[in-house]
């Protein structure tokens, strides 16, 4: 048995010894209830969901249930010769329309006629398009797509599913369509076409499929005339689970309702139409006393470290506060570099990405290590010799004070808007999932503790708490993997087998498709994001600038690179382990949660008391390490690049006081952005952080390349390059021309090319470039 396997086994056995498994608690429950009976004077042909409202469709009338489900509204006239999409398909000469609800008002949007009449048809929405799957007059399968908001919408025929079969349900979920047939389940996506999925555990009731959350589909299932059950299909693992099996046997005309499904049950003794529903509700998984004790001890320890450095250090200059008096050991700076670089995005969003897809993004880590070797030898020692506190001071020396202030302002915006807000939001999602505490309070608590110890302890507190936090979060991550290995029947071998079958560990995509994350895209990104523009990241550079000399600065990068690869494998392995675990235990998933909440849900529902608290502390550690770094770096930029530049003869003590105040202000602004982010349902926060960094961060990053690698670049040309890069990258984002992972590299490349060409229109630099470029003869 390998060392890794033994380590994971020991960790898992320890979890059993600490406490009984938490899996006895219910993750979700299904609540059934009778909906208000409908007094209709004509037969109800179908139930239909439109914009979250339930509609009862009669031959000539339509009734709408109130938003709270308490009462049916007055009947509205159904337009003559109109067939409603999702309720029926038109006969010859009948108009097809889509029901839409806005502010309790029901309207009908006319749609173009289908190319041919279909029967047994099912409809679904996906990415603002409408899809119809049905059988033509000869019983042959037909599949059509319509973009209803196009200037001239038209039904486009697509390749139909193989081996015919009568459609029972068609549902759009997780960027694909799922078609239920009497004997099988199929998946369709625009890039892969049709593929087989595991068959349902019971016959699906026609028309009952509905998406829920970000990766589940709910169905009513059961033989005709027998009791029905509510079942779920997980679109990522392809696994089925029975959620409740005692539903009425006469369920007819099912439709989406809130977090579940509603259906007709037939008339009651007064002739009114009876309706019922089944809704999925999340179980309450609360932290226990030992979990809270572990978390409190961790938070108090972090605050104590900040207070220790506050009382120990006499900060008479901003150098003491921002770069720790340049006395940080290289190995501690390297650990801090990795801790700052592996935020809650790594701890939560990376496992979620590996759970949903594969290990393709890990390719970036492998390639980045090669790029860091160049940085350690050439770039970091050059800048460390300049004794900077703000890396943007270099841009002033090389170009112009305005370039420095513009780039510094953009960097502050990127850190607060792109990184800090996402990094604060993700752990708050975990806390809300596990404890039930409102996300707003979670964000405030996380931000408050981080602001406090960062403002108290300065850079030394940031670095040494990073060292402790790395131990905590890596320990929690390894424990989670060990727990999964222990509780799977086949252990590590089963994880390897299932991962290989589903290609979950695939890393390298050598295609030239610019809309995907490929090896070429990662090389392109690393060249521009790491090799040519590493100094753009004040958060990382501040650690190298805190070492005693240029030799230690380079060694800190080597230490960072040495930790990056094994650390990356750990976080991606969590996602793969969770995939195998939930494929074997689909009933343990919560359909209501986002994909990003997969690991937090596992922590809450599966791990024993105390261990849950330890891993929550790991999530805190992952977030707080990066948050403290961002806060300290933003305060550094605000103080060094703006306050000390704009205030005449600044007093050192006043500069330190301003730095402390800016630490608090930066933290509060980041908290505000995180609260704003929490109001939106975003599919992948990992992708969002990449997009924002690319749109805002690439322009000023290219200025470093122009400064260090060319002698001809000048300040007017660089200013033009920065502005053009931001503008053109925004256009690429608006038109969705390439995969978001390319935005940053494209923005940097545009700044370099345009900035250099624009520099040729102006006189060359007149000042000495000695020590400012990589060329030794300058």
Image (tube, grey):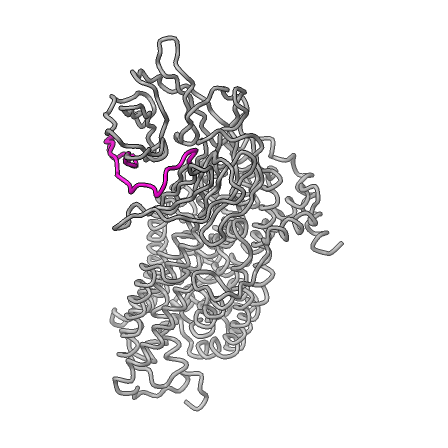
In the image, is residue 70 above or below residue 777?
A: above
Residue drawn at (47%, 50%) of the image: 303
Q: Quadrant of the C terminus?
A: bottom left
Magenta stretch prevailing secondary structure: strand
Single out the residue that lies furthest toward the front. Answer: 138
Q: Is residue 408 visible?
A: yes
Q: Is residue 411 left or right of residue 372?
A: left
Q: Identify the image quadrant of residue 211.
A: top left
Residue 109 magenta = yes
Q: Is residue 308 left or right of residue 66?
A: right
Residue toward you, 274 or 776:
274
Single out the residue that lies furthest toward the right. Answer: 1
Q: Which residues are magenta?
A: 94-121
Residue toward you, 341 or 741:
741
In the image, is residue 566 above or below residue 531?
A: above
Where is residue 447? Give x, y as percent: 40, 49
Residue 186 magenta = no
Residue toward you, 262 or 306:
262
Q: Quadrant of the N terminus?
A: bottom right
Where is residue 181? Give x, y as percent: 52, 36
Single out the residue that lies furthest toward the bottom. Answer: 777
Q: Is residue 296 visible?
A: no
Residue toward you, 696 or 46:
46
Where is residue 709? Give x, y as percent: 41, 81
Where is residue 638? Give x, y as percent: 32, 64
């Amino acid at each position: 048995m390998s060392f890794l396997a033994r380590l994971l086994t020991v960790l898992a056995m320890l979890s059993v010894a600490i406490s009984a498994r938490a899996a006895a608690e219910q993750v979700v429950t299904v609540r059934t209830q009778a909906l208000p009976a409908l007094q209709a004077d004509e037969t109800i042909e179908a139930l239909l969901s439109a914009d979250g409202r339930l509609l009862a469709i009669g031959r000539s009338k339509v009734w709408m249930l109130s938003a709270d489900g308490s009462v049916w509204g007055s009947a509205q006239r159904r337009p003559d010769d109109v067939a409603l999409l999702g309720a029926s398909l038109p006969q010859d000469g009948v108009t097809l329309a889509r029901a839409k609800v806005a502010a309790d008002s029901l309207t009908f949007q006319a749609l173009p006629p289908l190319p041919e009449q279909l029967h047994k048809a099912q409809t679904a929405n996906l990415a603002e398009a409408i899809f119809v799957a049905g059988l033509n007059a000869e019983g042959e399968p037909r599949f059509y797509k319509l973009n209803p908001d196009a200037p001239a919408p038209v039904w486009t025929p697509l390749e139909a599913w193989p081996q015919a079969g009568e459609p029972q349900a068609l549902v759009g979920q997780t960027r694909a369509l799922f078609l239920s047939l009497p004997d099988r389940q199929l998946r369709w996506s625009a890039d892969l076409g049709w593929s087989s999925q595991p068959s349902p555990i019971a016959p699906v009731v026609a028309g009952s499929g509905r998406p829920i959350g970000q990766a589940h589909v709910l169905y009513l299932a059961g033989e005709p005339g027998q009791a029905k059950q509510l079942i779920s299909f997980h679109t990522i693992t392809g696994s089925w689970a029975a959620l409740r099996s005692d539903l009425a046997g006469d369920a007819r005309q099912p439709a989406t309702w809130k977090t579940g499904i509603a259906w007709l049950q037939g008339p009651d003794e007064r002739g009114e139409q009876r309706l019922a529903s089944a809704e999925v509700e999340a179980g309450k998984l609360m932290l226990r006393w030992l979990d809270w004790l572990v978390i409190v001890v961790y938070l108090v320890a972090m605050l104590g470290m900040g207070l220790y450095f506050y009382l120990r250090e006499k900060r008479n200059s901003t150098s003491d506060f921002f770069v720790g008096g340049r006395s940080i050991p290289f190995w501690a700076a390297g650990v801090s570099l990795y801790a700052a670089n592996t935020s809650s995005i790594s701890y939560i969003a990376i496992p979620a990405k590996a759970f949903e897809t594969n290990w393709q993004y890990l390719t970036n880590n492998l390639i980045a290590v090669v790029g860091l070797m160049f940085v350690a030898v050439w770039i970091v020692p050059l800048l460390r010799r300049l004794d900077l506190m703000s890396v943007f001071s270099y841009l002033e020396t090389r170009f112009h004070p305005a370039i420095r202030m513009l780039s510094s302002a953009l960097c502050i915006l990127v850190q607060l808007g792109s990184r800090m807000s996402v990094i604060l939001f993700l752990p708050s999602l975990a806390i809300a999932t596990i404890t039930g505490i409102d996300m707003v309070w979670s964000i405030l608590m996380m931000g408050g503790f981080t602001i406090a110890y960062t403002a108290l302890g300065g850079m030394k507190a940031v670095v040494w708490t990073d060292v402790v936090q790395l131990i905590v979060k890596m320990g929690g991550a390894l424990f989670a993997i060990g727990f999964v290995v222990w509780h799977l029947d086949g252990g590590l071998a089963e994880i390897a087998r299932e991962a290989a079958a589903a290609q979950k560990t695939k890393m390298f995509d050598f295609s030239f498709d610019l809309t995907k994350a490929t090896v070429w895209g990662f090389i392109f990104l690393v060249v521009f994001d790491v090799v040519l523009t590493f100094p753009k990241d004040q958060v990382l550079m501040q650690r190298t600038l805190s070492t005693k000399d240029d030799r230690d600065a380079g060694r800190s990068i080597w230490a960072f690179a040495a930790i990056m690869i094994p650390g990356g494998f750990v976080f991606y392995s969590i996602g793969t382990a969770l995939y195998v675990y939930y494929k074997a235990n689909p009933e343990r998933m919560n359909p209501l949660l986002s994909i990003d909440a997969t690991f937090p849900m596992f922590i809450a529902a599966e791990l024993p008391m105390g261990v849950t608290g330890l891993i929550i502390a790991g999530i805190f550690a992952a977030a707080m390490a990066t948050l403290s770094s961002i806060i300290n770096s933003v305060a550094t930029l605000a103080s060094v690049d703006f306050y000390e530049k704009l205030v005449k003869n600044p007093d050192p003590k006043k500069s330190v006081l301003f730095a402390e105040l800016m630490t608090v202000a930066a933290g509060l602004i980041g908290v505000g952005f995180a609260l704003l982010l929490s109001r939106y349902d975003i599919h992948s926060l990992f992708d969002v952080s990449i997009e924002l960094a690319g749109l805002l961060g690439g322009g000023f990053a290219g200025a470093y390349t122009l400064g260090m690698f060319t002698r001809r670049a000048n300040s007017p040309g660089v200013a033009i390059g920065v502005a053009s890069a931001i503008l053109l990258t925004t256009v690429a984002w608006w038109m969705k021309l390439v995969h978001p992972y390319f935005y940053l590299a494209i923005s940097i490349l545009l700044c370099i090319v345009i900035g250099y060409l624009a520099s040729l229109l102006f006189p060359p630099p007149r000042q000495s470039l000695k020590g400012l470029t990589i060329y030794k003869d300058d």
